[in-house]
Amino acid sequence: NFYILTRGYKANKLEDIKGKKIQTPLFEEAPPAKITKYLIKAKGLNVDDYEFVYGEPFGRPEEIYLDFIRGHADTVILREPEASYAIKTMEKIGEEISIISYNEIWNEINEGFGSFPNAGIVLKGEFARKYPEITEMFLDELKNAIEWLNKNKIESAKQSFEMMKQPIENIELFLNRVKFEYVEGDKLLDKVNDYFDILIDQGIVDTKMDKEFTDIFKLNN
C-alpha cells in the first residue's frame, strides 16, 4: 500500500522522478526505501540516479503527508491511509498530482502476484492455546467486521472520524482505495511464502523461512 506522489510536475513511471528529492518514511534500511530500490533495479534503472531524503531521527508518514500538501515537498513516498488523505486534500484544493502505485509495478515485475499482505492480528501463542474458544470468537468477529466495512464504506468512515482525525471524505477515499480481505489458512501461508521469498531473495529482510517462522501464521500451534 505504498505510493509515490508528486506535485508540480507529471510522473507516470519511476524514470520520471530521477533527480528529485524523494521524502521517504523511516530510514535507509527500512522496508519503504529497500522496496523502492528493489523496484527501481528490477525495472532496469540505476538507484544512484535517485535521491532519498529521510527525516530526523526518521521519516514520519504524517509529517511527510503534511510537507506534501503544504508544498514543502514535491515527491514523497506515502503508505495508506496518508496517501489517500493527500490525494483527497490535493483534489479539494484543485492541485494536480501524479500517483505511482507500488502494487502495479510489483505485479509488472512479479506477474500474477496480486495484493500485498499488509496487516494482521497478532496473538500470543499462549493466549490462543489457553483460550481457543475466545480466539475463534474474536477472529469470527474480525471477519464479520471486515465484511461489514466492505458493504458500508460511508458509515465506516463516519464511525472512524474521531480515531482517524481526518475529514470523512478523506477516510472514505482511503476505505475505497484499499482492499480489505480476511485471509487465513493455506491461502495466507501461500501469500506469505510468495512475499517473503521475494523479500529475502532481494535482501530486503533478513530472516529464514523455516517452520518456526511459518508457524507464526497458523492458528493451531
Image (cartoon, rainbow, N blue to C red):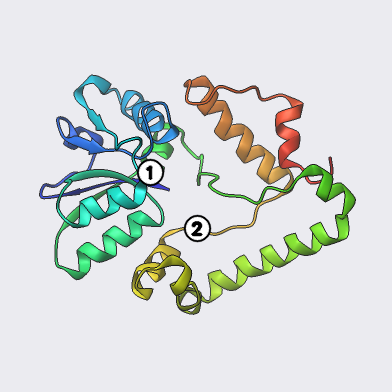
Which residue shows up at 17% across the image and 31% down it?
18
Which residue shows up at 55% across the image and 71% down it?
149
Q: Is residue 175 above or below residue 40?
A: below
* Residue picked out by circle 1: 104
Which residue shows up at 50% across the image and 77% down it?
159
Residue 46 visible to the viewer: no
Snapshot quadrant of residue 200:
top right
Q: Where residue 120 sits in the image (x, y, percent)?
A: 62, 50
Q: CA distance from mark 2 to mark 1?
A: 14 Å
Snapshot quadrant of residue 108:
top left
**Is the C terminus in the top left, top right, bottom left or bottom right quadrant?**
top right
* Residue picked out by circle 2: 179
Q: Amino acid at mark 1?
A: Glu
SS label for mark 1: helix
User: 50 or 62: nearer the eye?
Assistant: 62
Q: Is residue 158 above or below residue 28?
A: below
Which residue shows up at 29% across the image and 34% down it?
54
Q: Where residue 148 sits in the image (x, y, percent)?
A: 60, 73
**Label 2: how many Cα within 10 Å (few below 14, some 14–19, many 20+):** few
